[in-house]
Image (spheres, rainbow, N blue to C red):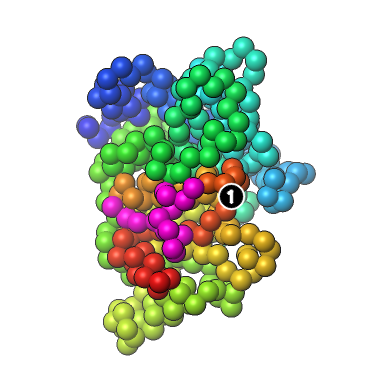
Amino acid sequence: MRIGTTLTNYTINKQKGFQGASGTFTGLLNDIAVACKRIADLVNKGDLVGVLGAADTENVQGEQQKKLDVISNDLMIEALQHNGHIAGLASEEMDEIHQLPKGARRGNYLVLCDPLDGSSNIDINVSVGTIFSILKAPEGVENPDEADFLKPGTEQIAAGYCLYGPATILVLTTGDGVSMFTLNRDFGEFLLTREHVRIPEQTAEFAINMSYRRHWDSPVERYISECLEGKDGLRGKDFNMRWVASMVAEVHRILTRGGIFMYPCDAKIRAAGKDGKLRLMYEANPMAMIVEQAGGAATTGTQRILEVAPQEIHQRVPVILGSRAEVERVEAYHG
Ligand code: AHM
Ligand code: MG
């Protein structure tokens, strides 16, 4: 499609390819884009409008919420619940599935989101983002419950994220490649800036939180030590390291110039009774779909992320994603 096409025209054109398409999907993406623009505006204004800092609340995972976590969640609900495009909404920031108000029109889709990922970065003015995943709602279900959302990532109709960085960029896949749209703030439109995004297969850049090294399992320790050995080691090349602590920013870097991102399970996470840090339904699945659609790979170490059968909505998983050859190497080390 022509570079500069608006996100709305892009989705209208895509939807024309589907027989019997009603325009609901275009409407839904438009709702999500509206929420992202409103979040972008607040992230951008920060202290000027008093949105930085902690809220007085914890989310269901026992994590301290930031004011902007709560506000972004409210903005997603507000943008989505009245337009007749969704049947239900689940979010990292809400204990339960959000039920639409009585009388609100129901639509064909379910949305899962992390309204503001990487929120530990908000107060220091580093990139954060919104992640979303779209599933088909079960036929005839007015008020979907948790079980209706528990589908493996392979069943996602679409997935995307909006990165609030120096530029605000919305990245989208509907299952036939990955496209990027940059927000033109002058007239408030997302415009197509990159299509057919491909992750380079080879890379010499890894992203992992090294401060957890003493807790790692041996396959992760082996992979990273071999990278650190550089030119003189088994890999025969020097590696570079990045850690933004903001998954949206890490995935965006990988889509742009390759690399591998790892948030594995480790002894400390296991001792806390968890299976990983990142959430399957709001973070791992949508990012895995985007990365695979760009030619990369995404695994838990032992299983393709998109094939994990979810057991509960806030489930956590180990995440290793990025350039295919590197991800396959880590998987091979897991045996
Ligand atoms: P969040 O959803 O509470 O923001 O947590 C997810 C974030 C990811 O964006 C990032 O990769 C990770 O947490 C950083 O974790 P750590 O602070 O352990 O390095
Ligand atoms: Mg998150």
> How many marks can you see?
1
Q: Which residues are magenta?
A: 295-309
Is residue 299 among what the camera can see?
yes
Q: For mark 1, what is the residue?
A: 315
Place residue 93 in its image quadrant.
top right
Looking at the image, the residue that sits furthest to the top is 103
- Examine the rendered structure and indicate whether residue 196 appears above or below residue 253: above
In the picture, which quadrant includes the N terminus? top left
Q: Is residue 123 above or below residue 210?
A: above
- Return the x and y of residue 234 as percentages of the image width and height: 32, 84
Residue 99: percent from the left, percent from the top?
63, 25
Residue at 43% over, 71% down: 334
Q: Is residue 146 above or below residue 304?
A: above
Quarter containing the C terminus: bottom left
Point 53% across, 36% down: residue: 149
Please state which amino acid type lies under the numbered disc 1. Answer: Gln
User: Image check: 247 left or right of 314?
Assistant: left
Decide if residue 43 is in sight here: no
Q: Residues within 10 Å of mark 1 (few under 14, many from 20)?
A: some
- Give the residue displayed 35% in from the left and 56% down from the top: 297
Q: Residue furthest right?
A: 56
Residue 244 place in picture, x, y as percent: 50, 60
Q: Residue, x 28% and y 47% (percent of image)?
A: 197
Q: How far from the left and from the top, in percent, is residue 242? A: 45, 66
Is residue 32 magenta-colored?
Answer: no
